[in-house]
Amino acid sequence: MPYDRKAREDAQIAYYRSVANLKPTLSDPDIKFLYQQQPVGIDLKGRILLRPERDAAKPPRHYSDLLEDLSSDIALHSRHNLINGVTLQHSSHSCEKYSPFKETLYLPRYFINMTLPHRKVSGITFKRHNGSQTLKLQADDEIGLPYGVYARLVLIFITSERVRTKEREFKLGASWSKFLSKMQIYKDGVKVQAVKEQLKRLCATTYRIIDLNKVQRTESFSQMLVAEEWMRSSDGVHVTLSPGFFMMTGDFVVPLESDIVRKLRRSPLTLDLYAWLSYRLFRLKEEKTISWHSLEKQFGSNYRRLVDFRKKFLNSLEKVLKHTPPAPGVEVREKGLHLSPGSPSDIEWMERMITRARSSNRFPS
């Protein structure tokens, strides 16, 4: 529901009707402020979501009271029983406004379509499915499988460093500390140790990608390590990326916004959804509905019932949509999640960042 066409039209009708109702009681600056807000849809709590126009003035000091009055009028007069009020999405912005100096982070595409475990898993094997593809993780029995938020942040850091430095080998140093600080993981001994533990697990795991296409009767199999060598010594941790991972992270990466990653870093499912939606809305050429069963196989983590996964998924989706550009591409339906192609500005930004990463896909001399 959030950004499909009907929700957007319902939001616009209800919003502008209420602005007109309140207009006689408002000052000219207040009226100007309200008309500079664009209703882009209805969020999962039934509130009209507003996005400021590109050159909109700063909100007045009493804007919260203004929006509360507007919400009351909407609740009183709206003909749409799903609309509960209005909220201003401060952090939303189109990718066309992104500063070229804003930091971009990267994730490998294969780890977006099929994600790491959300929590600690017993045993040394783990599988994810996405259509005809299967990602199978095989861990060292003395080290264990990577999992959780820290494993994802480490993978983002490694991939981003590879794109930034164009090197296979690097040492965790100033850039590592800067990244942890940006993610608000400060020099807490327990947290830093947990992050390094996930680095070790990532590097000690074998990743197998199996593609079995029953329609075309084709089958492919590939195997990869993240790191060819991992070593911790007195002067720090040294990592040498495997040839396979180095090449993959030159050709098949998805750009992510560093500020959004930081805001969503507390939940592995929320991080997974942000990366996945960014990629799917960029690649999508026509509308598509993905069933709850397929989403559970791709993102689920040992939920006993599909309804439990769906509840968790929708909670995470709401958090993601608060921080990402409100592209008219996400609609929650009874059968699953309905997606439409992303906005031109978002796609243009994604293409530009991917091209930048691909320009460094050769081995260093």
Image (spheres, helix red, strand yellow):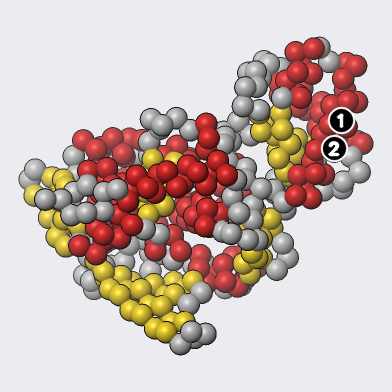
Location of residue 125 (image quadrant) = bottom left
Is the residue 39 above or below the residue 126 in the image? above
Instruction: Please give the name of the residue rendered at 47% of the width and 42% of the height, measured from the top-left corner.
Output: 349
Q: Alpha-carbon distance for marks 1 and 2?
A: 6 Å
**Camera-side residue: 312 or 158?**
158
Q: In the image, is residue 3 above or below residue 245? A: above
- The answer to whether residue 229 is left or right of residue 61 is left
Q: Residues within 10 Å of mark 2 (few under 14, many from 20)?
A: many
Compared with residue 334, is residue 253 higher up or lower down, i.e. above or below? above
Q: Is 325 placed left or right of 41 in the picture?
A: left
Q: Which residue is mark 1?
A: 18
Q: Secondary structure at mark 1?
A: helix
Residue 241 image position (x, y, % from top left) = 20, 57
The total number of labels drawn is 2
Provide residue 66's location: percent of width, then percent of height: 77, 22
Answer yes or no: do the residues labelled 1 and 2 have beta carbons within 8 Å? Answer: yes
The residue sitting at 44% across, 66% down in the picture is: 114
Of the residues shown, which amino acid type is indicated by label 1? Ser
Residue beneath disc 2: 14
Whether residue 119 appears in this view of the structure is: no
- Tell me which corner region of the image, top left, top right, bottom left or bottom right, holds residue 251: bottom left
